Amino acid sequence: MTTLTISHLTKRFEGVTALDDVGFDVAPGERVALLGHNGAGKSTLMKIVLGLIPASSGSVALMGAAPGSRAARSLAAYLPENVAFHPALTGLEQLGFYLRMRGEPARGAMPLLEKVGLGHAARRRIGTYSKGMRQRVGLAQALIGRPRLMVLDEPTSGLDPVSRRDFYAILDELAGEGAAILLSSHALTEVEARTDRIVILSQGRLRANDTLANLRRKAALPIRLQVTARPDTADSVAGQLSGARRNGVTVDLMCRHDEKLARLGQIAGLQPLIEDVEVLPPSLEDLYSHYSRSEGQ
Amino acid sequence: MTRILAAAAAETRIALRNRWVAIAVAMMALFSMVLSATGSAPTGILGADRLSVTVASLTSLAVYLVPLVALLMAFDAVAGEVERGTLPLVLTYPVSRAELILGKFLAHLGVLALAVAVGYGIAAAAVIWTDPRAQAGLPALWRLGWTSVLLGATFLGIGYALSALARRPGAAAGLAIGLWLVLIVLYNLGLLAAVVTDGGGRFTTQVFPWLLLANPADAFRLYNLAASDATAAAAGLGGAASTIPAPLALASVALWPLFSLVLATLAFRRITP
């Protein structure tokens, strides 16, 4: 059984279609990245899943419960983009409040803060926290009560690289315990390593929904071979390989996946003229622009 | 209930840190001290005990001050959360909007009750210290105390409703002050003008008493003055008070808090984060 089921979801705001017939599932223990430009409909989709705003049509079910129902709200945790708290409360008090809102005793606040690395600042007012520290408080509140679904909107914005690593370590742990995770992000490289499946939204429509490997295969984007020529040979190398010279020493060749070995053979044949060669597979950025441009635009 | 108490506890901490507790208590204490120092002058003429006279003065003070303090605490309750961006997160928790409002309400009402108790307590202590006979006025003071809390409750609810409708703290503050002016100051001026123009006609005898009862601040004043011997000394509306039965005024004072809380919840439900 899937944790989150979205089908034919459409949302219109006064003439603007923010989401158009979107559907996908998230299974227990699965980490799904939701990608899209600003205004692609990511936050709208998350808010509908959480029951904060109603859908125009289509359906969303959270382990069978309707979004916004008390049952659904006890199953889901949310970390909003730029999460905010009352500046006059300490981290400990704020987290105690959220614990009690989920029917748990407030004494669980300190262990949670320690888990996100905020134990030392627990008794300071949130008004004195940095953005990264507030984001950690946001993560701590999302961990309360072992949620079955975590909805995280740009969770790592404002976090330094080390904090990001810690953050994903906590997510992996949760996914290992069976929580379904739906997160949006602009940091494509971290999504690449840390999620199981990618959903791409563009202009409110679902453009892709698959594992990264499958997306790469389906897109069949060309591979870039970057050849570094020896001094003064770049023109000759570019001519013989019919590639494009990018600067004084570098020549770029684009080829399909099945041509790669043959091309590398040609390059090896020019060895006296060549210093080095690098094989660059299509990046997630390339894939992302490929899928967000496909259809429609 | 746990959720309401959790919200109330957080809100009490915020009120303490924002100095609202200190400001509310200091305001009530200061005005009560001034009144108990100056308000005892007419005692000899009236023959009433000095505390009852002070209670009459405190009633007139409370009509202005209690709604003001309540609105000042309430105007930020919803609009502030909208502006800070704290609302969407808490609304994804398994808690109803009515529970959130009730939590804030309990906390603010606690602060208000404390301010009223300290203020009136100081006034009573000062009077009884100089004249032990004044203890006869203690029941009137007690009555003033709990009706003041009910009056404050009404304006807390109204403040939340305005806060939810305005959605921005600045606009909510403006609405709150405007409403205070209308309900507490202009309403009575308008009624007095109408009564004077009417010259004892149908308006004065049939409509006017109901209009007084409809305003929570007037109902509060009527109930306390009607129940007190020192009525005539204290207020120009005293004449009108004699025509309205005290139980009706009490009903208005007691029902308004419920009504205003329902209003607040309905207004809060309209907000989509």
Image (cartoon, coloured by chain):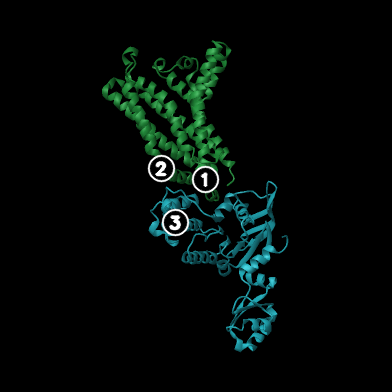
Can residue A1 be seen here? no
Q: Provide the letter of the chain coloured cyan.
A: A
Residue B57: percent from left, percent from top:
38, 22
Going by the numbered disc 2, the residue's amino acid type is Asn
Q: Answer few, some or many: residues within 10 Å of disc 2's Cα (few below 14, many 20 plus, some between 14 and 19).
A: few
Q: Which mark is residue A20?
A: none
Q: Identify the residue at the far right of this view.
A: A296
Going by the numbered disc 3, the residue's amino acid type is Ser
Query: For this rendering, which residue is in front, A280 or B233?
Result: A280
Going by the numbered disc 1, the residue's amino acid type is Glu
Residue with the mark numbered 1: B83
- Whole-number angstrom distance, CA of label 3 to CA of label 2: 21 Å
Which type of secondary structure does the marked residue at label 3 adopt?
Answer: loop
Q: Which residue is rendered at x = 50% and y = 15% of the image? A: B243
Residue with the mark numbered 2: B18
In front: label 3 or label 2: 3
The chain letter under disc 3 is: A
